[in-house]
């Protein structure tokens, strides 16, 4: 029964990732906790495997399509490692109820962001994809030293936040990375989506390495089943993206995220009182 649940959940996560370009991995933790019976520490650790492997496969696919700026992704990911290490270390020092309550709050924020994005899209307001790209370097050393410090600070802060979210809650943080790559690095949206997968792969690997010494042992059979199902379904979802109405799928996904967030909050908050 556990294997069947993991396969079904993995397929749903993978399809949403492939068809929508991100976001589905945020469902990995609630799936691991409420469907597969793992505690918060096990789930947020196991989620890093699901997120990281799916990101690597997605990044390879995006790179073959020419949609990855590998150098910029690796640099952003390395900057984010500080936050990933800090977040992973902090996660081992808080209770499971705190982890799940924080995750529920994050899901509410993500759900709200998705709602705003859809409302703006319907009203024809500009989104991140409408920002004109720029190839101006942030720091140059020749012929003279120059620094675009506001952009550098934005990248530092955003990368640290992304790393901390990944390390603490086991999420990819693509909903933060993509706008940051567009606004701070001036990438076009298709490049930002592909490059964000590189960032997520780096931060997930670092956070998982830190957690490896924390004596947290997820049910690796369930985690690996979920990961394989998600990765395979993501490929199918990417192929279906051109044939289905992703707007309606995005709306359904938003409702699902908000519903799961409310459910998690209702389960976790009583434990904090």
Image (cartoon, rainbow, N blue to C red):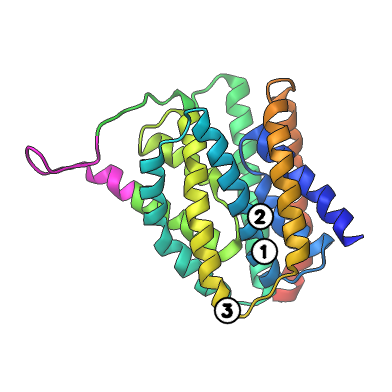
Point out residue 253 in the picture as x, y percentages from the top left corner: 73, 39
Q: In this view, does 235 lie to the left or right of 121?
A: right
* Quarter of the image with the C terminus in it: bottom right
Label 3 residue SS: helix
User: Which residue is pictured at 59% across the width and 32% down the height?
Assistant: 117
> Which of disc 3 and disc 1 is earlier in sequence?
1
State if disc 2 and disc 3 touch (CB < 8 Å). Answer: no
Q: How far is mark 3 from mark 2, CA to CA?
A: 19 Å
State if disc 2 and disc 1 touch (CB < 8 Å). Answer: yes
- Front-most of 222 and 119? 222
Q: Give the range drawn in magenta.
A: 137-154
Question: Quick one: which residue is furthest to the right in this view?
Answer: 1
Point out residue 52 in the picture as x, y percentages from the top left corner: 58, 53
Residue count near mark 2 (Cα–Cα under 10 Å), binned few <14, some 14–19, many ≥20 = many
Residue count near mark 3 (Cα–Cα under 10 Å), binned few <14, some 14–19, many ≥20 = few
Location of residue 125 with respect to 117 vertically, above or below: above
Residue 50's mark? 2
Residue 247's mark? none
The residue identified by callout 3 is 214
Label 2 residue SS: helix
Question: Quick one: which residue is furthest to the left in this view?
Answer: 143
The residue identified by callout 1 is 46
Number of marks: 3
Q: Is residue 80 left or right of residue 3?
A: left
């Amino acid at each position: 029964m556990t294997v069947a649940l993991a396969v079904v959940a993995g397929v749903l996560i993978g399809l949403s990732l492939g068809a929508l370009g991100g976001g589905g991995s945020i469902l990995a933790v609630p799936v691991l906790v409420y469907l597969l019976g793992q505690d918060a520490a096990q789930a947020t650790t196991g989620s890093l495997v699901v997120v990281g492997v799916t990101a690597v496969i997605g990044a390879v696919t995006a790179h073959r399509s020419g949609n990855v700026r590998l150098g910029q992704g690796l640099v952003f990911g390395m900057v984010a490692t500080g936050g990933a290490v800090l977040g992973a270390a902090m996660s081992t020092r808080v209770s499971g109820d705190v982890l799940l309550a924080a995750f529920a709050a994050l899901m509410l924020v993500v759900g709200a962001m998705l709602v705003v994005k859809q409302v703006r899209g319907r009203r024809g307001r500009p989104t991140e994809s409408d920002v004109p790209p720029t190839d101006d370097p942030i720091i140059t050393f020749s012929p003279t030293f120059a620094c675009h410090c506001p952009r550098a600070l934005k990248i530092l802060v955003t990368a640290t936040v992304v790393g901390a979210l990944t390390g603490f809650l086991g999420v990819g943080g693509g909903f933060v990375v993509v706008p940051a790559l567009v606004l701070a690095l001036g990438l076009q949206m298709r490049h930002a989506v592909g490059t964000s997968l590189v960032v997520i792969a780096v931060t997930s690997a670092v956070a998982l390495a830190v957690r490896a010494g924390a004596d947290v042992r997820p049910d690796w059979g369930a985690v690996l089943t979920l990961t394989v199902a998600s990765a395979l379904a993501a490929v199918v979802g990417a192929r279906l993206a051109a044939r289905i109405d992703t707007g309606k799928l995005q709306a359904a996904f938003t409702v699902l995220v908000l519903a799961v967030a409310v459910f998690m909050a209702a389960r976790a908050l009583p434990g904090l009182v």
